[in-house]
């Protein structure tokens, strides 16, 4: 099992334990645990997801469809970063590789990679 798979497995196990505690009416459930359980249940409620269809994301799709130039695109990226969404670029500040006494801004492709081969072959 890769580190990534082990991490996902541990997360799933913790979430399932929280849900079990709630379902067993454990009186020591924190507000945070209740939020985690409700969020998790909302993702696995396929009937509700299918019933809602695309409606929940239509406002976001409308914003995306109205992007008409580079400035609009960068404003959308900025807004997405502030709200916790991912964008197809990774922007970070790091030591300048040509002048290590200074910092520079780097822009890199993000989110285009796949897990290693074992992730797919062991399933």
Image (spheres, helix red, strand yellow):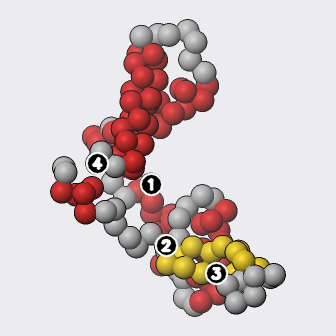
Local crowd size for mark 1, using a 10 Å CA cut-off: few (<14), some (14–19), many (≥20): few
Q: What distance separates the C-alpha of mark 3 from that of mark 2?
A: 12 Å
Q: Position of residue 42 (x, y in %)?
A: 41, 38
**Residue 8 lies in what quarter of the image?**
top left
Q: Do callouts 4 and 1 mark residues in contact (Cβ within 8 Å)?
A: no
* The label number, if any, that marks residue 47 in the structure image: none
Q: Nearer the viewer, mark 2 or mark 1?
A: 2
In terms of depth relative to the viewer, which is nearer, 27 or 102? 102
Label 3 or label 4, whichever comes before in sequence order: 4
Give the class, few, some or many, for how many residues have Cα within 10 Å of label 2's Cα (few <14, many ≥20).
few
Please give the label number shown on residue 56.
1
Looking at the image, which is closer to me, 71 or 115? Answer: 115
- Identified at 55% across, 32% down, the residue is 35
Q: Mark 4 highlights which residue? A: 50
The residue indicated by pointer 2 is 110
Which residue ends up furthest to the right in the rendered image?
A: 101
Left or right, residue 69 beside residue 58: right
Q: CA distance from mark 3 to mark 4?
A: 40 Å
- Mark 4 element type: helix
Tell me the residue at 33%/54% (across/down): 53
Q: Is the C-beta separation of discs 4 and 2 under 8 Å?
A: no
- First along the sequence among labels 1 and 3: 1
Q: Which of the 4 image quadrants contains residue 89?
A: bottom right
Residue 21 position within the rendered picture, expressed as x and y whole percent measured from the top left? 45, 16
Q: CA distance from mark 2 to mark 1?
A: 25 Å
Give the residue drawn at x 30%, y 45%. 1
Closer to the N terminus: mark 4 or mark 2? 4
Q: Give above or below for 93 relative to 71.
A: above
Q: Circle 3 — which element? A: strand
Asked whether residue 93 appears in the rendered view, the answer is yes
Residue bearing mark 3: 106
């Amino acid at each position: 099992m890769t580190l990534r798979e082990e991490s996902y497995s541990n997360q799933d196990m913790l979430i399932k334990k929280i849900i079990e505690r709630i379902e067993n009416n454990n009186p020591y459930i924190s507000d945070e645990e209740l939020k985690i359980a409700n969020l998790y249940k909302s993702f696995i409620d396929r009937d509700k997801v299918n019933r809602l269809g695309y409606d929940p994301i239509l406002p976001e799709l409308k914003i995306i469809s109205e992007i008409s130039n580079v400035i609009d695109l960068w404003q959308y990226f900025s807004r997405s970063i502030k709200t916790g969404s991912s964008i197809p670029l990774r922007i970070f500040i790091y030591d300048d590789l040509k002048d290590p006494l200074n910092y520079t801004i780097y822009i890199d492709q993000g989110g285009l990679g796949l897990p290693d081969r074992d992730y797919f072959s062991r399933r």
